[in-house]
């Protein structure tokens, strides 16, 4: 009989490497693109900026979901009961109701603040 092995990872190869910095970098890019969009009147540039911003916002969601679904476990929820709401809010801020659907830098700032909250909890769990 073959032994069963349980693995968890953010990709098909269980490396165990997780870091909220991936989401933050993409969110910083979203914010920078919003600012560049606001400072430029060229319609071709603006169209490109919107496309890239939406791609980056989708990557923010991806990196957040990887942390939420692969890294955080039920014991983390016991210690940090706000995690579910925090991830819900952050992914909504990265999606159509937030970074993907607007060029409002304030939404990007809100998203970055949520990622910072997630990051703080993440690093607390890593230190435990």
Image: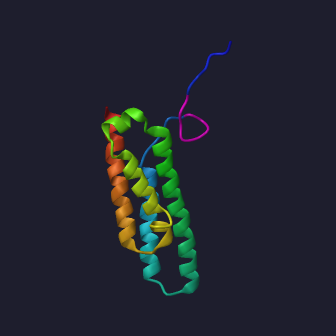
Magenta stretch: dominant secondary structure: loop
Q: Nearer the viewer, residue 47 or 85?
A: 85
Q: Is residue 11 magenta?
A: yes
Residue at 50%, 39% in the rendered image: 70
Residue at 41%, 56% in the rendered image: 90
Which quadrant of the rendered structure holds the N terminus? top right
- Residue extending farthest to the bottom is 41
Residue at 56%, 85% in the rendered image: 43
Instruction: Give the magenta range.
Output: 7-14
Which scheme is used to colour this image of the protein? rainbow
Please determine whether, in this image, residue 18 is positioned above or below residue 8: below
Please determine whether, in this image, residue 48 is positioned above or below residue 92: below
Res 35 → quadrant: bottom left
Q: On the picture, is 22 further left or further right than 48?
A: left
- Residue extending farthest to the right is 1
Image x and y of residue 22, in percent: 46, 51
């Amino acid at each position: 009989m073959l032994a069963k092995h349980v693995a968890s990872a953010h990709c098909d190869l269980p490396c165990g490497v997780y870091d909220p910095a991936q989401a933050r970098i993409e969110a910083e890019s979203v914010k920078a693109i919003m600012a560049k969009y606001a400072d430029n009147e060229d319609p071709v540039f603006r169209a490109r900026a919107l496309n890239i911003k939406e791609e980056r916002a989708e990557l923010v969601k991806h990196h957040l979901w990887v942390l939420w679904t692969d890294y955080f476990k039920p014991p983390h929820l016991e210690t940090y009961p706000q995690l579910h709401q925090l991830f819900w809010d952050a992914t909504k801020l990265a999606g159509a109701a937030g970074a993907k659907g607007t060029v409002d830098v304030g939404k990007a700032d809100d998203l970055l603040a949520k990622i910072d909250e997630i990051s703080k909890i993440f690093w607390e769990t890593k230190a435990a």
